[in-house]
Amino acid sequence: MDKEKIMQGVRLILDGIGEDIQREGLIDTPERVARMYEEIFSGLTQDASEHLNKTFAADGSDMVLEKDIFFYSTCEHHLMPFFGHAHIAYIPNGRVVGISKLARTVEVFAKRPQIQEKMTAQIADAIMENLDTKGVMVVIEAEHTCMTMRGVKKPGTKTVSCVARGAFSESRELRAMFMDMIK
């Protein structure tokens, strides 16, 4: 990330909205924003496979579900936050991953300028590819501040996106079981 370019951009925005960029409260704002961007966009330099490559042998092929994984992301259209919960289920194919690794996978994709629909598919595809699962399903429920603070201004509105791969896309029963479990 180019910290200096970010700082220049923030100064331009502040000046563009009519603020005094030399005002005491704003002098260090460009640097603070640049540091914040390094953190909230850290997923741009990460690969989800880093978190999904350590697996453990497991007998059986019963569904594994991790739900209510809280995340923050940034809408690529308005550069405003969206936040919510991800729910992930997969059917192991002889191997499982540590449970924290699913949450870390969500973080990799959430920490990028993003749209929710793409993030949902990226998480599902990363799990399918790296864990060689029989199937995966991901549901994301999120509130978008670009819709709650501006525009239509409807706080509390949730957008839900869903992706099913493998056995989940083939079985209505599996999808229904997943949906019952995340209620």
Image (cartoon, helix red, strand yellow):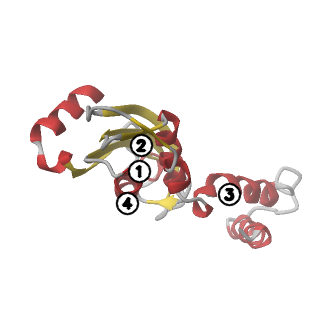
Q: Is residue 13 left or right of residue 68?
A: right
- The image shows residue 115 at horizontal and vertical percentages of 41, 59
Which of the numbered marks, if any, corresponds to residue 147?
1
Q: Is residue 74 left or right of residue 125?
A: right
Q: Is residue 26 visible?
A: yes
Q: Nearer the viewer, mark 1 or mark 3?
A: 3
The residue under label 4 is 118
Q: Are marks 3 and 4 in contact (CB under 8 Å)?
A: no
What amino acid type should be assigned to the residue bearing mark 3?
Answer: Tyr
What amino acid type should be assigned to the residue bearing mark 2?
Answer: Glu
What amino acid type should be assigned to the residue bearing mark 4?
Answer: Lys
Marks 2 and 4, how far apart at CA: 16 Å
Decide which of tag 2 and tag 4 comes sooner along the chain. 4
What amino acid type should be assigned to the residue bearing mark 1?
Answer: Met
Marks 2 and 3, how far apart at CA: 20 Å
Circle 1 packing at 10 Å, graded few (<14), some (14-19), many (20+), is: some
Marks 1 and 2, how far apart at CA: 8 Å
Q: Nearer the viewer, mark 1 or mark 2?
A: 2
Which of the numbered marks, if any, corresponds to residue 37?
3
Q: Is residue 183 visible?
A: no
Decide which of tag 1 and tag 3 comes sooner along the chain. 3
> Is residue 62 or residue 169 the one in the foreground?
62
- Name the residue at 68% across, 52% down: 39
For label 1, the SS is: helix
Q: Are marks 2 and 3 in contact (CB under 8 Å)?
A: no
Circle 2 packing at 10 Å, graded few (<14), some (14-19), many (20+), is: many
